[in-house]
Image (cartoon, helix red, strand yellow):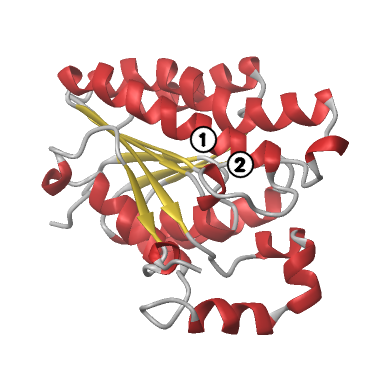
Amino acid sequence: MTQFQDKIVLVTGSGRGIGREIALHFARQGAHLVVNFFRNRDPAEETAAAIREIGRDALVVRANVGDLDDLARLYAEIDAHYGGLDILIHNAASGYNRPAMQQKPKGWEWTMNINARSLLFGAQHAVPLMEKRGGGAIVAISSMGSQRVLSEYVVVGTSKAAIESLVRYLGVELAPKQIAVNAVSPGMVLTDALTHFDTFRDAGDSLIDEVAEATPTGRICTPQDVAEAVAFLCSPGAQMICGQTIVMDGGHSLLAR
């Protein structure tokens, strides 16, 4: 029997990138998946098909987690299909990359609602479903922009800082319910999301090589690295980790520059 045999796992934003890899990793470990997407159905259906090829069940749900009605419907569909939930991976993210002086209220609300508000109110929906199963785990995906200043990342970085704060509060409040809450904060990860940054578009592979050379482990983080760390935080071996944000960047952020 594999580690997450017949567990029910929701990965928000799991059609592509890190979310897709996390979903597939849990499926390989025996879990059934809820694949969530908002705009692009085809990648989500491809993720679900890959999960079914592994021999696990996959429920595909279109929902904008930044919309409270959509968020409620997402969990209602999970309850109707599976009757409970064991693990929530809060991965879906969006945002407007602009300098602080060019940010607009709409961009702030959009980013904060999808990235941070959905964690709090998603947890309110998830916890009753987890209590039906005797407990569970919530893991949020953060980023180094929560603590460090990245170019034009002000609103997304602020939303990630809010996520890490919510993880601490939820971690303490939900621990008595046997629900572990933590976050993973990767460094640079090679996904399509990098193409949204002007710095990467200008430098491309040379930037990846530069970061890898400046990282003690000699390489950048992969989606599989993130998936394995997330799965560990949902495992029995991580029961005493509560409200923490685990930085995984190969030691890059530890070096003084």
Residue drawn at (81%, 44%), measured in percent from left and top?
99
Q: Is residue 114 visible?
A: yes
Horizontal side of residue 203 vs 163, given as left or right:
right
Horizontal side of residue 193 vs 58, given as left or right:
right
Residue drawn at (73%, 24%), measured in percent from left and top?
109
Query: In the image, is residue 44 above or below residue 118?
Result: below
Label 1: which secondary element = helix
Tell me the distance, in whole angstroms, between the alpha carbons under discs 1 and 2.
6 Å
Q: Residues within 10 Å of mark 2 (few under 14, many from 20)?
A: many
The picture quadrant where one finds residue 166 is top left
Q: Residues within 10 Å of mark 1 (few under 14, many from 20)?
A: some
Residue drawn at (81%, 74%), measured in percent from left and top?
202
**Amino acid on which disc 2 is placed:** Gly
Residue bearing mark 2: 157
Query: In the image, is residue 160 above or below residue 192?
Result: above
Is the residue under label 2 in contact with that under label 1 (CB below 8 Å)? Answer: yes
**Amino acid on which disc 1 is placed:** Ala
Horizontal side of residue 1 vs 14, given as left or right:
left
Residue bearing mark 1: 161
Viewer-nearest residue: 57 or 177: 177
Q: Is residue 63 visible?
A: no
Viewer-nearest residue: 181 or 22: 181
Label 2: which secondary element = helix
Residue drawn at (19%, 47%), measured in percent from left and top?
235
Position in image of residue 129 (x %, y %): 33, 20
Query: In the image, is residue 156 above or below residue 122?
Result: below
